[in-house]
Image: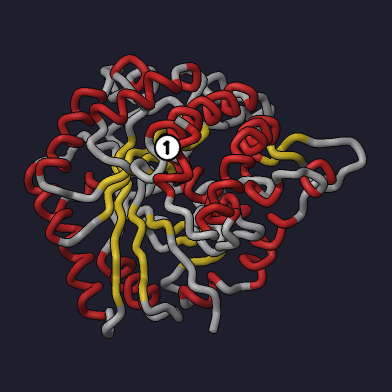
Amino acid sequence: MKNPYCIIVKPIGSICNLRCDYCFYLSKRKIYPDKNNFKMDEKVLETFIRNYIDQDSEEVVFIWQGGEPTLLGVEFFKKVIDLQNKYSGGKNTRNSIQTNGTLINDEWAAFLRENKFLVGLSLDGPEDLHNAYRKFRNGEGSFKKVMKGLNILYDYNVDFNILCCVNNVNVNYPKDIYDFFKEYGKTNYWQFIPIVERCNDNSIKPFSISPDAFGKFLVNIFKRWIKRDIGKISIQLFDCAFNIAMGMVPSVCIFSEICGFAPALEHNGDLYFCDHFVNKDYFIGNILNQPLAELVYSERQRNFGKLKSQLPHKCLNCEVKIFCNGECPKNRFINIENEMAPLNYLCDGYKMFYTYAKPYIIKICNDLSKGIALSNIIKEFK
């Protein structure tokens, strides 16, 4: 049995109604010459769904991203559901969609609820922090429309997570972000995604976070969480750390020892190693010309995934390596003398956080293994 894989689908490519300064995917539009046709057509869609469901897994998870996938309209995703039902063969199929939330209305919410979509909603904190970078083309901040969409999702009882992109502005306000999400976020599932982007000369773009600031941000978020909300609020990075400490497989690909099982599919059927590596150097093939599984399990794709295990000695000798495994290859660009493998730009930030959190994580896991109730374990943290 081959390892199951998860495709990150870009059914509308990089087309979006926002112009977020830090978005790494908007520039992918330059790859495709036909700039007026970015909608995944029915042939590509059906080919993908049929072949994707055919993998060795009893449950198949579809992840729809962009750009902004809701620009395709509800009708496109009704077609998705029809095709999944046609080819499921008894398998359980689940869907998640990542959105900026500005187009969510009653029709969307009703559809998402009826078809049990998990929604990832991008929200960077209170209005001033969110609007720092998440703006429409005319420069208007998107906060009010995002919050309107969030409230509609909540009213329709749609399952959704908050995806917070941590940048050079909001990284300085962990308390404000935490308290805002807790009071107004209306979901207990949060993700914090570090923004690190480079210019052509390899310098860091100004909206990117520094390793030190990111480490302090995570420590401060963790302090509030461990004292008040552990067991109540799920924060993806923290949950993943606990999974690892308990001997489970990391729930997030960037913390795994190897990667390569989450390729990105563009609107025309082009498949790439990963959505952070969508360019001609990392192109695998097109699903209309070659079976999807053949592309995913190709030697080039497997070799790409194995490269993640190549780490500099600073990582190999690190006492918290087990938690991060060098994080995402896209952030590994710090060259060290006499080292073949580069260091992750965020290394010092992750080390700061995991060094602080590790004693709590280990104690909690050990106590849970002894049958002690979490409510009793965390009393001493109050």
Give 119 or 263, whichever is nearer the viewer. 119
Res. 151 image quadrant: top left
Amino acid type for the residue under numbered disc 1: Leu
The residue tagged with tag 1: helix, strand or loop?
A: helix
* Residue drawn at 46 percent across, 73 percent down: 292
Give 256 or 230, whichever is nearer the viewer. 230
Res. 198 image quadrant: top right
In this rendering, position of residue 248 left or right of residue 376: right
* Residue drawn at 20 percent across, 36 percent down: 150
The image position of residue 373, as x and y in percent, is 43, 52
Q: Pointer 1: what residue?
A: 26
Give 307 or 288, whichever is nearer the viewer. 307
Give 363 or 83, whichever is nearer the viewer. 363
* Residue drawn at 20 percent across, 60 percent down: 116
Res. 84 image quadrant: bottom left
Name the quadrant of the N terminus: bottom right
Q: Is residue 315 visible?
A: yes
The image position of residue 74, as x and y in percent, is 15, 53
In this rendering, position of residue 175 left or right of residue 184: right
Which color scheme does this rendered protein use?
secondary structure
**Is 238 situated above or below 205?**
below
> Residue most toward the right?
338
